[in-house]
């Protein structure tokens, strides 16, 4: 049983236009695009990737849906060259790529 406002590690199993499906323990949950970042996210796949593991905050269960957030764990976002990165610990794959581009 998941507890609201707790942090869980999940694997991204599918990315759609407005949400990502994640697997946390034996539960499939959803992360809506609005819970990825406070900035406009055009393509979730530019931020997270299928098969990768991230920490998510469990928000609530709505019927048979489990709702998670990424941005609530990493609220201090930065915008660099029209791409989103986060402070250390968040958006690691994007951060590493941006650092290489900035060199």
Image (cartoon, rainbow, N blue to C red):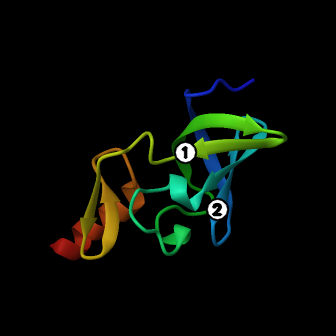
Measure how far apart labels 1 and 2 are at the Cα level. 11 Å
Look at the picture and state if 78 lies above or below 54. below
Question: Which comes sooner in the sequence, label 1 or label 2?
Answer: 2
Return the residue found at the far right: 64
Residue 53 image offset from top left, x and y in percent: 56, 48
Say which residue appears at 56% left-offset and 63% top-offset: 49
Quadrant (top left, top right, bottom left, bottom right) of the N terminus: top right
- Please tell me how crowded label 1 is: few (under 14), some (14-19), or many (20+) other residues with Cα within 10 Å: many
Mark 1: secondary structure:
strand
Q: Which residue is mark 1?
A: 69
Query: Relative to 13, does residue 89 appear above or below in the rendering?
Result: above
Q: Which residue is mark 2?
A: 19
x and y percentages locating residue 103 in the rendered image? 15, 73
SS at circle 2:
strand
The reply, left or right, for residue 23 in relation to residue 103 is: right
* Vertical relation: 94 (above or below) 23: below
Residue beneath the point at 56% across and 55% down: 52
Quick one: 69 or 13, which is closer to the camera? 69
Disc 2 crowd, CA 10 A, few/some/many (<14, 14-19, 20+): some
């Amino acid at each position: 049983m998941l507890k609201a406002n707790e942090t869980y590690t999940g694997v991204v199993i599918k990315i759609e236009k407005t949400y990502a499906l994640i697997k946390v323990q034996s539960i499939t949950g959803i992360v809506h695009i609005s819970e990825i970042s406070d900035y406009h996210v055009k393509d979730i796949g530019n931020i997270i990737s299928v098969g990768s593991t991230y920490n998510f905050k469990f928000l609530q269960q709505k019927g048979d849906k489990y709702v998670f957030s990424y941005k609530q764990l990493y609220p201090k976002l930065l915008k660099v060259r029209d791409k989103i990165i986060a402070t250390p610990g968040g958006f690691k794959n994007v951060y590493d790529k941006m650092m290489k581009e900035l060199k």
